[in-house]
Image (spheres, rainbow, N blue to C red):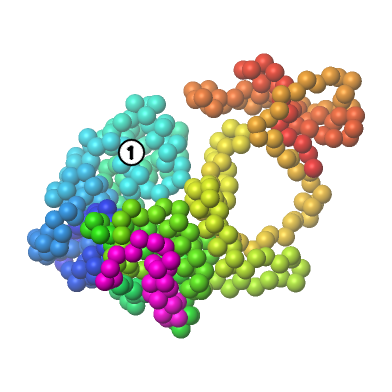
Amino acid sequence: MAASEFIAVFSRDLPFSLLDLAHTLTPRVEINPPDALLLEVTPRSRAGILEKLERFSPSLQVAGAATRSAALIAARMSPRTWVPQGKEAEFLAPLPVALLQLLDDNPQLPDFLVTFSRWGVHSLGDLAALPEKELTARLGQPAVRLQRLARGEDLKPFQAELPGHRFEAAVDLEYGLDSLEPLSFILAGLLDPLCNELEACNLATDSVELELKLETGVVSQRKLQLAFPLSHSKTILALIRLELQSQAEKARITGAAIRLNPVPPRIWQHSLFEPLAPAPEKLARTLGRLGAIVGKENVGSPVLLNTRRPDAFRIEPFAPTKARSPARGEANRPVLRRFRPPFPARIRPEQTVNWVGPWRTSGEWWAETAWNHEEWDVEFVNGTIYRVFFDQKRRGWFLEGVYD
C-alpha cells in the first residue's frame, strides 16, 4: 500500500465550491479553519490533483509534503512547493518560529513565542535544535509539542470530513443591493428552509458562514460563532444583521450564500432549586448586540492566565454551562472585590483594628507589567476588611480590594 501524502490548499476567501471539488478529487478531506484545506493523496494521484486545483483557480496557494504540518506551512509561505519525505525539518528550519500559530491553537502560544524571542530562538530550526530535556524542564510538555511541530511532525491523526447532507443555500441577484433591509429579506428566504431542515433532522447550528458577492468581483466572507446551538431562523437573522451593521460592505451586493454547521442540539432544562436563566435565543441575541457595540474580542468569559501576576486574564468565547451548586462551607467564604485600578491610600495605625501579613509577591521583572508588592489584609475600625499592598517600585500604599 502506497504511503499517504498531503496537499494543503490555502485561499483568503475559501469558497464553498472548493470543498465540493476537493471531495471529487479524494475521499479524505480535512478542513483547517479558517482558510485552508488538507487533501490526503497517494504519490500516483498527486500530479493530477495538483493540475485540477491549478485549473480551478490560479490564485490558490497549493503545496504538499509527507506530513500535514509541513504541507500547511509550505502552502502559506512557498506555494507550488513539494517537500520530499524526510526533508520536512530541513525545509522548515529557516522559517520564522511565529508560523507555529498556523498549526497550534494553544492559548499559551503567544507567551511561548515571547519566551523564545528572549532566548534568541527566532526560526523553526532554532527551536528544533533545543535540547528536549532542558526544554521540558523549563516550559513543560506544551513546548515540546511546539518543538515537534517545528521539526515537521504531526501531533494528531488526520480528521477527514465525511461528505454528507450540506445545510447551505445560495442566490444570485438580478440587481445590486446597497442597503440592509432588502438584503435581510433575501437572507430570511435562505435561512427559513435551512432551519426547518435542521429541526426536521433534530439538529441545530453553532456557527453560520455567510458569503456576499460584490459588484467589484470580491467575495466577502464572514463567520458567526454562536454562543449556543440554535435552529431559530429569526434569531440567527438578527445576529447576521448585527454583524452586517457593525461592518457594512463598501460595494453593492449581487449574490449571497449561507452555510450552517450542523451539531446536536443542547437540552436546556431548568432546575427547581436554581433561579431561572434566560432563554438561549435571548442570550445569543444579547451577546451579538454587545459584540456589535464593544467589539467581539471584548465579549466572553474571563479565564485566568498561567502567571502569578495580579489581574492577569484573557477573554474566551462565552459558552453557557449549568450553574454549580456551592460546596459545603463555600457559601460563607468572604469574596474579594478588586479595585481596577487600585486606589492610592494613606493608612494610619489608629484607623486599624487587626491585620494579617505581609505576603510578598513579585514577578515579570523583564516586562512593563513587572510588580513587587507586600500585601496585607487589614480590618478597619468601621468593621470593613480591605486588601492593601505596598508597592516597592512606586513606594506607596494602595487599596487592592474589599472583602464582601
How crowded pointer 1 is (Cα within 10 Å; few <14, some 14-19, many 20+) is rated as some
The C terminus sits in image quarter: top right
Q: Position of residue 102 (x, y in %)?
A: 32, 47
Magenta segment boundaries in residue numbering: 172-197
In the image as oriented, which residue stretches furthest toward the bottom? 200
Helix, strand or loop at label 1? It is helix
Q: Position of residue 26 (x, y in %)?
A: 20, 69
On the image, numbered disc 1 is attached to which residue?
98
- Please tell me whether residue 339 is drawn above or below residue 335 in the rendered image: above
Magenta span includes 40:
no
Main SS, magenta region, reads helix
> Which residue is located at x 85 percent, y 31 percent?
379
Q: Nearer the viewer, residue 94 or 166?
A: 166
Q: Is 60 left or right of 138, judged from the image as shown?
A: left
Q: Is residue 313 visible?
A: yes
Q: Quadrant of residue 126?
A: top left
In the image as oriented, which residue stretches furthest toward the top? 395
- Please tell me whether residue 73 is drawn above or below residue 387 in the rendered image: below
Q: Nearer the viewer, residue 352 or 100?
A: 352
